[in-house]
Amino acid sequence: MKTVLVVEDGHAEQQLISSLLSRSGFDVILQGNAEDAWQWLSSHTPPNLIVLDVIMPGQSGLDLCRTIRNQDQLKQIPIIFCTSKDQEFDKFWALRQGGNAYLTKPFAPKQLLDTVYQHVN
């Protein structure tokens, strides 16, 4: 079973993403901020993919992405940014920081699943 780490501070968004992925056969790990996600990544087998919010209390998703990309054992994990920031520059910058894909909230469930499948296979 493929594992997806979801790093999202919004409870409703966490539950929506988790439900979609779980029903599609993924093992889902939820973390509410970048610091907790980093602690989890540092002490567990790396996930197959990360769904990452950009704006969170404390460290941002962009900061976490840069940290992951600087770690040899983690840098190949696909990262999908899922955020309410909808400007073209926001997308450009997130992908430039190491993201593999960028989804804007609200997103269609099929859009999330298609993007996840594209990057885990």
Image (cartoon, rainbow, N blue to C red):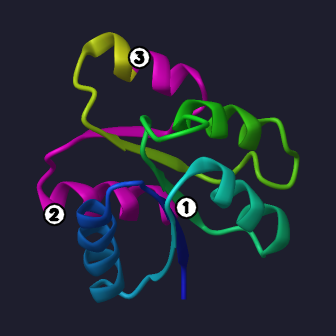
Q: Could you tell me which residue is drawn at 85 percent across and 44 percent down?
A: 71
Q: Quadrant of the N terminus?
A: bottom right
Span of residues in magenta:
92-121
> Circle 3 is placed at which residue position?
92
Give amino acid for label 2: Pro
Specify whether 104 is left or right of 55. left
Mark 2 secondary-structure assignment: helix
Give amino acid for label 1: Leu
Quick one: label 2, few (<14), some, or many (20+) residues within 10 Å? few
Q: Is residue 85 above or below residue 29?
A: above
Q: Is residue 74 above or below residue 53?
A: below
Specify whether 67 is left or right of 47. right
Q: Between disc 2 and disc 1, whose residue precedes? A: 1
Quick one: label 3, few (<14), some, or many (20+) residues within 10 Å? few
Specify whether 84 is left or right of 35. left
On residue 109, the disc is: 2
Q: Mark 3 near mark 1, Cβ–Cβ under 8 Å?
A: no
> Circle 1 is placed at which residue position?
49
Q: Mark 2 near mark 1, Cβ–Cβ under 8 Å?
A: no
Which is nearer the eye, 12 or 91?
12
- Residue 44 position within the rendered picture, expressed as x and y whole percent measured from the top left: 78, 75
Q: State the separation of the CA atoms marked 3 and 2.
A: 23 Å
Looking at the image, which residue sits at the far top? 89
Give amino acid for label 3: Phe
Which is nearer the eye, 33 or 4?
33
